[in-house]
Amino acid sequence: MLGEFPQLLVNGLVAGILIAVPAIGFTTIYAVLRFPNFAVASHVTIGAFAGYAVNVYLGWPVALALVAAFLAAGVVGAVTDEWVLKPMRPHGALTAAIAAIALTVVLENMIRFGFGNDLRGYDLPIFRDWRFGPVRVGPQQLENAGLAVLIMALVFGFLAFTRAGKAMRAVADNPTLAAIKGIDPDRIGRSASFVGMGLAGVGGVLLGLDTSIDPLTGFRAVLTVFAAAVVGGLGSIPGAVVGALVVGIGEELSLLAVAPTYRSAIGFVAILVVLTLRPRGLLGERAY
Amino acid sequence: MTSYRFRPHRRAVLQGATAAAALLAAPAIVRAQAGTIRLGTLTPLTGAGGSYGPSMRDAVALVVKDVNAAGGVGGQKIDLISEDDQTNPEAGVRAAHKLIDVDKVSAIIGTWASSVTTAVAPLCWESKTALFTVSGADSITALPHQGFIFRTQPNSQLQVHEASKFMLGEGGRKLAYIGPQTPFAQSSIDIMTAEAKKGGQGVDSLIYENNKTSYRSEVDKILQGNPDWLLLGGYTPDTIILLKDLYKAGYKGKMLGFAYAVNAKLLEALPKEVTEGIYTFEPSPAIGSAAHGHLLKMLGKSDVDPYTAQCYDHINLAVLAMAKAKATSGQAIHDSVRLISQGGGKEVSDAVTGLKAVAAGEKIDYSGASGPCDFLPSGDISGTKFRFDQVKDGKFVTKKIT
């Protein structure tokens, strides 16, 4: 049984790194706008299909598909937030969260209207895995994980070194103080939606590259994304990364003990344990 | 005291209301008596079964057209109403309510997914509407359906039994089952295990969670036992992901999948090297039979899927049963199907010929495009053929028919 351990660890690590990207998006929006935006589900799907469109119809490589996914999901995210979710926010976080669920249903069905229900795969060759002793790793897995790490580095760089990133962190830390300092919360809210949903879209492509995509791609991932953000501490960006790794590795290692049919339950269990023992998440609420 | 005279009594109100209701209902009654027989199709035009539903509906419509052109059933024309079950029990129940309550159909034809059939069945037997289905789950004919369900699809028990025999016959030494959590997953494993035990072999099995984006770890787990044959128990979406992961893991053994899952859509979604050599199986249409030939000619095609063949049989059975009973209700179909489908007599393979024979007072035995269409008391069919195909260079090649 322990022979499986290294393989499951590697699988979990890769799964966690991929989930970390949309989890960062989700938690960024939470940090700035203070509500759980469940519309990430449909934006993961939008990104996956935008990436699919440029990859398959236009024949662009994966890196450009990621850019297209970021822009498409980011623009849709910013626009729908402005029109649909922003008017709901004054009525409380719960109202906005429910509106976000409704929004995700609408967007998902618009995708279905355009692309249909069929499964689609990116235009990529499939390779046999490389074997290192007891562990096997897919070339595509490594590439995806590398891309995810690169994207996360860009996000951290954006938040640490750019003016917009610093302003975003300021609003997340203390909106009143930020407003006194002359930072426009509306503008920051819009950029948070754009960046957050853009990252969700990128996550959609990363998840789809190794598997296949359909209008439910985002819906399937959203529980794990949410669990990652909660486990790490809602609103904490490094927390989202840690949370994603914990949930990703946890889901895989659980196969040692429980039947594979219960894999999704690990996300719920992780939320339950963290909220019971450490309600603010592993890394607390600090945005950065 | 004049006001007293005009005060409406409760009984008078009730009588008035009843009369009004009868008046309102009258047009429907008049319509039903005067003219047409109403039958419904409830096939999956969208969703996971969306690639089968339209042609199932078309086969029924073409038979109805022929029957109407030949004068209908006992002089009454058939009015066919087609609904979409969206491969979804909820939508299926809504559509069935409409067909039964509004359109007042005598029979519903063509439910495909087991979940839809299970949800729709109680509405049918409660309203005495005949239900013809192509679903496979064992549990369906075990429902208390009072004889209103007619199933032309062999149940999953029989299917897995045939599959196990095939894999062992092809030299399988270590069989394994991998599939999602479904009503037939555990029973399939049990049947495989029993069949393999006869040769002293064991069976590995793994039931996974549906709707996951990767099955890497599941694949590692099932391959630990070094199986040389895998039975794939999933539907198209999860099987696509599973096959990719099996390929990446370097699995070189043989695989057998249900033809409704390993279908043309799956071949399109995967590169050829991933699907090469996979076997598929399905209940075989009665290729070479008169009914099968007639159906192909009607559709103008050279090949037909088993569900369309079964729907062709459904409508023929319903029409001939009504003719035999000289009545058009669901109850009449319920009572008379077995009188025209089995037990000897003139062999008939299409409704128009059958109608003439029934009118002439002959005893008929319908033999269909999907098989002989002989029903057991449970509503299941007895005896059917299976077809095993193999994927070669991205196409299905028929391997054998058992």
Image (tube, coloured by chain):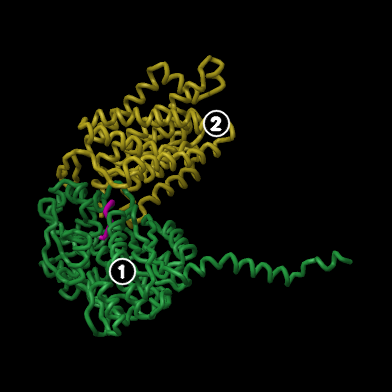
Q: Residue A27: percent from the left, percent from the top? A: 43, 33
Quadrant holding the N terminus of chain B = bottom right
Q: Is residue A18 above or below residue B61?
A: above
Chain letter of the green region: B
- The quarter of the picture where residue B387 lies is bottom left
Residue nearest the viewer, comparing A121 with B222: A121
| Residue positioned 35% across, 73% down in the render | B73
Q: Residue furthest right?
A: B1
Q: Is residue B285 above or below residue A10?
A: below
Quadrant holding the C terminus of chain B = bottom left
- The quarter of the picture where residue B21 lies is bottom right
Question: What secondary structure prevails in the magenta region?
Answer: loop
Given the image, what chain letter belongs to the residue carrying mark 1?
B
Q: Residue B160: percent from the left, percent from the top? A: 24, 68
Q: What segment is highlighted magenta in the picture?
A: B233-237
| Residue positioned 36% across, 42% down in the render | A113
Q: Residue A267: percent from the left, percent from the top? A: 40, 47
Chain letter of the yellow region: A
| Badge nearest the viewer, 1 or 2 | 1
Residue nearest the viewer, comparing A13 with B264: B264
Q: Which residue is mark 2?
A: A87
Residue B339 is tagged as: none
Give the amino acid type for the residue marked by disc 1 in the picture.
Val
Q: Residues within 10 Å of mark 2 (few under 14, many from 20)?
A: few
